[in-house]
């Protein structure tokens, strides 16, 4: 059945082959859910830019009269001969280390830029096996046929009548081509260095992959000269001896991977493990030890057993933490015993791809209103992860078409702290609107499933927190969940008052 459905999908896509190239690509992208895939891969919208770049190239090709078959042939040739199409311009980010070529960095700027490999033959890269000389390298177009021929050296035999004289002119022209290539590389180095806003790190090494050491390039020497004048040379390794060889090849370091964390203590550790395995069990009711370490183990074991007995046969009280999140309050209202077990044995909360997408939606709302806030781990809402078939773009469009899309809030992403029953409650209000002199706090829910009664505790806390922040009566503040995927705003009735929230907290402590 899956093959039958797939065949039907292919026929539907092929039926669009007679239209424009971009329409066909858009149809394929939608069918493959390509935008969702690239966003889940890197967690940002960077992949989308590369898709748009591909669509731009397809649009240019189509406007010049190209057909689908010729477009596919062009892509095949570009992949084989040019390493593919040129990527989209990089997005400057501050949360990662970006690695890219100098050509791709044009027009961008970073606070700190590192340019490694400034060795002779590497940067500038003068490849002896692939010189930029069309006379000796058939891969290059003759310079006088290129669009930039006015900037390139012209070749002439200069009236040579003998093979020896012609050879000299060819050799002289090769030197000119090499000098031209060096100038281009120096200009490229200038591009790399001027990408740095405040700090530039330029490095080289005496040894590359070969046996012999290599000189620093002319570019590095110029940078080192400027750095030395300003006292900014971080590290300088003396020049090797003339006959020195690459130590990584002559005396390579070896080791065991993965590394044994115990190292030379492994044998002693293994012997102690065997002693434990072969030791007779202790009767904890009568066991005693003169060894302080063993006594501690005995007491710990007795305490764990006693705690287990109390948990099964009696009442084991779990003290309320001095600080709670609003999500924890919801859990307290829903199932106090389950929350007590969670506090007693805390486990990290998993955040899957849908929860991350929900967080991305909240960040988009923040940017939509030109707000600027910082999130920490406690601000993430684990109550409403996205369903598998939702995408961030669909959420954006649905929200913009909702009743809230054209309204301006008085506050966005409002952090708060409130003390209730001696416990500090922390949280963050998604948005606050003012309606006819009254306020309404809104919590965006990126899940389509309507939450139960306990979730309303979250709104009760938000309402009370906003009233305290503004110094007004909580009766002047209402609260609601807005379920973005279904454009539904839910205003639960009879939200808990401040006294009821305190009773909820103190009654469980």
Image (cartoon, grey):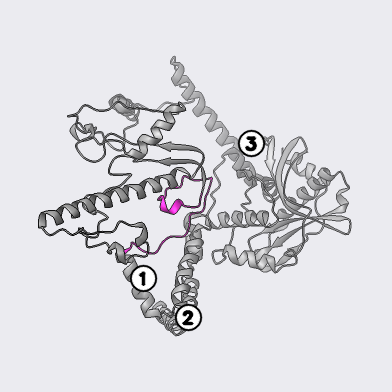
Badge 3 crowding class, 10 Å Cα cut-off, few under 14, some 14 to 19, many 20 or more, is: few
Q: Is residue 233 visible?
A: no
| Residue 93 or residue 189, whichever sits in front | 189
Q: Is residue 236 left or right of residue 296?
A: left
Badge 1 crowding class, 10 Å Cα cut-off, few under 14, some 14 to 19, many 20 or more, is: some
Checking the image for residue 183, the label placed there is none
Please tell me whether residue 315 belongs to the stretch shown in magenta.
no
Task: Name the image quarter holding the C terminus.
Answer: top right
Disc 1/disc 3 C-alpha distance (Å) = 69 Å
Checking the image for residue 75, the label placed there is 1
Q: Residue at x 25, y 36 (%)?
A: 214
Q: Residue at x 33, y 38 (%)?
A: 218
Q: Which residues are magenta?
A: 82-108
Measured as percent of width and height from the top left, residue 400 is found at 69, 66
Would you say the magenta stretch is mainly helix, strand or loop?
loop
Mark 1 against mark 3, which lies toward the viewer?
1
Q: Is residue 496 left or right of residue 367?
A: right
Measured as percent of width and height from the top left, residue 382 is found at 61, 52
Residue furthest top in the image: 290
Q: Residue at label 3?
A: 316
Does the CB distance between marks 1 and 3 fall below 8 Å?
Answer: no
Please, is residue 78 above or below residue 99 in the view? below
Does the CB distance between marks 2 and 3 fall below 8 Å?
Answer: no
Measured as percent of width and height from the top left, residue 26 is found at 50, 74
Please, is residue 362 above or below residue 346 in the view? below
| Residue 106 or residue 408, whichever sits in front | 106
Measured as percent of width and height from the top left, residue 221 is found at 35, 34
Q: Residue at label 2?
A: 20
Q: Is residue 137 left or right of residue 447?
A: left
| Residue 223 or residue 60, whichever sits in front | 223
Number of numbered discs: 3
């Amino acid at each position: 059945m899956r093959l039958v459905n797939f065949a039907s999908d292919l026929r539907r896509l092929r039926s669009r082959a007679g239209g424009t190239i971009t329409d066909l690509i858009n149809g394929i992208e939608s069918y493959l859910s390509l935008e969702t895939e690239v966003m889940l891969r890197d967690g940002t919208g960077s992949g989308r830019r590369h898709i748009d770049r591909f669509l731009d190239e397809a649009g240019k090709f189509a406007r010049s009269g190209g057909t689908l078959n010729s477009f596919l042939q062009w892509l095949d040739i570009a992949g084989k001969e040019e390493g593919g199409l040129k990527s989209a311009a990089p997005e400057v980010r501050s949360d990662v280390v970006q690695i890219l070529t100098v050509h791709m960095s044009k027009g961008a700027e970073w606070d700190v830029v590192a340019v490694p490999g400034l060795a002779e033959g590497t940067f500038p890269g003068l490849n002896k096996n692939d010189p930029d000389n069309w006379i000796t390298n058939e891969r290059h177009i003759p310079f006088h046929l290129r669009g930039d021929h006015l900037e390139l050296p012209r070749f002439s035999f200069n009236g040579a009548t003998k093979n020896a004289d012609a050879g000299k002119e060819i050799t002289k022209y090769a030197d000119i081509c090499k000098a031209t290539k060096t100038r281009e590389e120096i200009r490229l180095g200038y591009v790399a260095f001027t990408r740095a806003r405040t700090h530039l790190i330029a490095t080289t090494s005496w040894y590359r992959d070969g046996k012999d050491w290599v000189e620093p390039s002319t570019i590095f020497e110029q940078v080192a000269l400027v750095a030395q004048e300003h006292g900014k040379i971080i590290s300088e390794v003396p020049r090797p001896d003339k006959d020195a060889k690459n130590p990584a090849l002559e005396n390579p370091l070896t080791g065991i991977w993965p590394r044994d964390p115990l190292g030379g203590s492994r044998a002693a550790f293994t012997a102690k493990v065997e002693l434990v395995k072969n030791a007779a069990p202790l009767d904890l009711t009568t066991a005693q030890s003169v060894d302080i370490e063993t006594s501690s183990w005995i007491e710990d074991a007795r305490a764990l057993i006693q705690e287990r007995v109390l948990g099964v046969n009696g009442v084991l009280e779990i003290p309320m933490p001095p600080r709670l999140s609003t999500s924890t309050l919801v859990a307290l209202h829903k199932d106090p015993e389950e929350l007590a077990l969670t506090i007693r044995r805390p486990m990290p909360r998993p955040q899957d791809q849908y929860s991350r997408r929900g967080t991305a939606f909240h960040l988009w709302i923040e940017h939509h209103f030109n707000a600027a806030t910082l999130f920490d781990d406690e601000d993430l809402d684990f109550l409403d992860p996205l369903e598998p078939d939702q995408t961030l773009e669909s959420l954006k469009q649905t929200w913009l078409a909702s009743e809230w899309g054209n309204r301006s809030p008085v506050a966005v992403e409002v952090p708060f702290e409130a003390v209730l029953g001696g416990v500090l409650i922390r949280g963050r209000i998604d948005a606050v609107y003012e309606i006819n002199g009254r306020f309404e706090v809104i919590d965006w829910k990126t899940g389509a499933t309507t939450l139960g009664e306990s979730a309303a505790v979250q709104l009760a806390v938000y309402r009370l927190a906003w009233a305290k922040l503004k110094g007004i009566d909580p009766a002047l503040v209402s609260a609601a969940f807005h379920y973005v995927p279904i454009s539904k705003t839910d205003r639960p009735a009879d939200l808990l008052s401040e006294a009821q929230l305190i009773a909820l907290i103190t009654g469980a402590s």
